[in-house]
Image (tube, grey):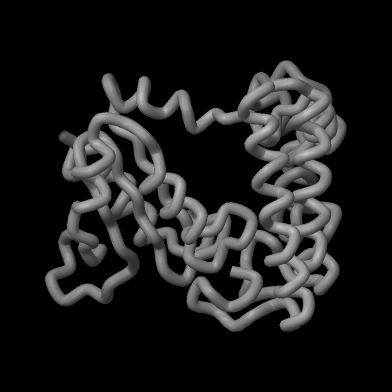
């Protein structure tokens, strides 16, 4: 995504792309070490190295890691000024009282907690191994905005196709279909969907990390249809 492979122009320079590509094998090896040991001593170094080598060059451009189309407008609020406005509203005494919230302060993202997860080795634990067990009993939807970098659609498509589970072959062979609003027969395509068994992957056009914020109508459409069981086994 950072180097122009996801449908949007490259964000970083050619030399930085090469440096990121060169760092990838080392990052992958460190991640595998984390998978094998599960140890903090393996997982924390993997998190720090990979983040610095593959996320750092992107962040230094000033571009929004949640949306390759825009600059990071407010670094104190995950690049979105609106998150600050939401916090200001929710932290008013009368709002806290009306909600019955049993907390003294609302934060959209607590970086102390985030850091604790990092130093507990949480970031690169192989949580994908839990998904096959979920698929045995419940439907799973993975969706990504096509302009998101931090959780980009290319990576999500790659891991869903690589996931080892009984339905893997069927999922990988499934047709990729267009997404249009269900009750609009002449509606514009807003994404792609691939589904087999209980597993569904979607790429949503014109959206960053905050898909419902960027594409509210499309989000309402695909989410309600998924809840209704349209793509489930």
Give percent across and percent down for residue 96: 72, 28
Vertical placement of residue 213 versus 147, above or below: above
* Quarter location, residue 58: bottom right
**Residue 118 in the figure: left or right of residue 138:** right
- Which quadrant does the N terminus fall into? bottom right
Q: Is residue 6 above or below residue 105?
A: below
Pinpoint residue 155: horizontal percent, then vertical percent: 51, 55
Q: Residue at x 46, y 55 (%)?
A: 144
Q: Residue at x 33, y 65 (%)?
A: 191
Give the farthest residue toward the top: 102
Q: Residue at x 76, y 41 (%)?
A: 47
Judging depth in this view, the residue of 42 and 148 nearest the camera is 42
> Image check: 1 left or right of 107?
left
Q: Is residue 132 left or right of residue 227?
A: right
Is residue 93 visible to the viewer in this orientation of the structure?
no
Considering the image in quadrants, where does the C terminus appear?
Answer: top left
Residue 99 seen in the current view: yes
All told, the count of numbered labels is: 0
Quarter assignment of residue 12: bottom right
Residue 65: % across, % down: 69, 62
Residue 40 to residue 110: above or below: above
Q: In the image, what residue occupies the spot 76% across and 43% down?
A: 87
């Amino acid at each position: 995504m950072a180097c122009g492979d996801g449908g949007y122009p490259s964000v970083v320079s050619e030399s930085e792309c090469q440096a990121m590509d060169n760092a990838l094998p080392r990052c992958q090896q460190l991640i595998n070490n984390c998978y094998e040991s599960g140890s903090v001593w393996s997982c924390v170094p993997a998190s720090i190295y990979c983040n610095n080598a593959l996320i750092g060059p992107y962040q230094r451009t000033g571009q929004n890691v949640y949306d390759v189309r825009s600059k990071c407008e407010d670094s104190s609020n995950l690049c979105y000024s609106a998150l600050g406005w939401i916090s200001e509203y929710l932290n008013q005494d009368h709002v806290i009282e009306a909600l019955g919230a049993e907390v003294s302060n609302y934060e959209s993202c607590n970086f102390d907690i985030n850091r604790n997860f990092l130093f507990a080795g949480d970031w690169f634990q192989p949580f994908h191994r839990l998904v096959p067990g979920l698929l045995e009993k419940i439907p799973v939807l993975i969706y990504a905005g096509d302009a998101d970098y931090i959780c980009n659609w290319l990576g999500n498509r790659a891991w869903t196709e690589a996931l080892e589970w009984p339905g893997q072959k069927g999922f990988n062979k499934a047709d990729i279909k267009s997404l249009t609003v269900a009750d609009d027969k002449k509606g514009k395509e807003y994404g792609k969907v691939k589904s087999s068994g209980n597993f569904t992957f979607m790429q949503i056009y014109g959206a960053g990390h905050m898909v419902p914020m960027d594409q509210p109508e499309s989000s309402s459409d695909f989410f309600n249809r998924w809840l209704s069981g349209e793509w489930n086994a």
